[in-house]
Amino acid sequence: MADKTLFTKILDGELRADLVWQDDRCGAFRDINPQAPTHVLIVPRKPLPGIADMTEDDRALLGHLYFVATEIARREGLDNGYRLVVNQGEHGQQTVPHLHVHLIGGRQLGWPPG
Ligand code: DGP
C-alpha cells in the first residue's frame, strides 16, 4: 500500500490537528499557518494528489467538499462572506500533494491574489 499522505495521517488521527468536521468522505481541520481568523482545510479521504487528478467519478466528491465548506462557514459565522481556494501544482503554489479546499474568512480579503 502506498504511504499515507500527511493529510491522511491527520484525518486518521495519527497526527494532531484541530479537526472541525469528519464524515465518511472527507474531514476538515484548521490550517497550521492561518491566513485569516478562519482558515480551514477540507480534505477528501481519497488521497487525490490535486484537483487536476480528479476523474468523472470524483465529481460528486468535489461537490461534497464544497458543500461541507459552506456548512463550516455557516458554523463559523462567516455571514459577510469568505473565499474557497484550491491551489493546483507549482504555479498554483500547492505545497501539500493531497487535494484540499481552503476556507478562508473572518476578515476583508483582497483581490487579486498574488
Ligand atoms: P497548499 O499550499 O494549497 O498546498 O496548502 C497547504 C496548507 O496546508 C498550508 O496552508 C499549510 C497547511 N499545512 C501544512 N502542513 C500542515 C499540518 O501538518 N497541519 C495543518 N493543520 N496544516 C498544515
Image (cartoon, rainbow, N blue to C red):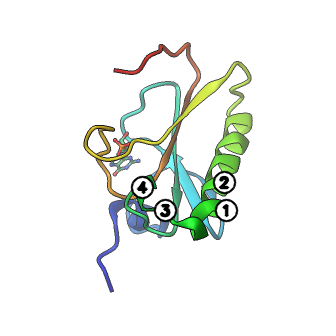
Quadrant in which residue 50 is drawn: bottom left
Residue type of the residue flagged with mark 2:
Gly
Label 4 and label 2: CA atoms lie apart by: 15 Å
Quadrant in which residue 61 is drawn: bottom right
Disc number lying in front (2 or 3) = 3
Q: Is residue 72 left or right of residue 102?
A: right
Q: Is residue 63 left or right of residue 9?
A: right
Q: Residues within 10 Å of mark 2 (few under 14, many from 20)?
A: few
Q: Quick one: 9 or 62, which is closer to the camera?
A: 62
Residue type of the residue flagged with mark 4:
Ala
The residue under label 1 is 60
> Dot 4: what SS?
helix
Residue 102 locus on image (x, y percent): 50, 40
Residue 4 locus on image (x, y percent): 34, 73
Image disc number at residue 63: 2
> Dot 2: what SS?
helix
The residue under label 4 is 52
Which residue extends farthest front? Answer: 56
Label 2 and label 1: CA atoms lie apart by: 5 Å
Label 2 and label 3: CA atoms lie apart by: 12 Å
Image disc number at residue 39: none
> Dot 1: what SS?
helix
The residue under label 3 is 54
Q: Residues within 10 Å of mark 1 (few under 14, many from 20)?
A: few
Image quadrant occupied by the N terminus:
bottom left
Mark 1 and mark 2 in contact (Cβ < 8 Å)? yes
Mark 2 and mark 3 lie on one chain; the one further toward the N terminus is 3
Mark 3 and mark 4 in contact (Cβ < 8 Å)? yes
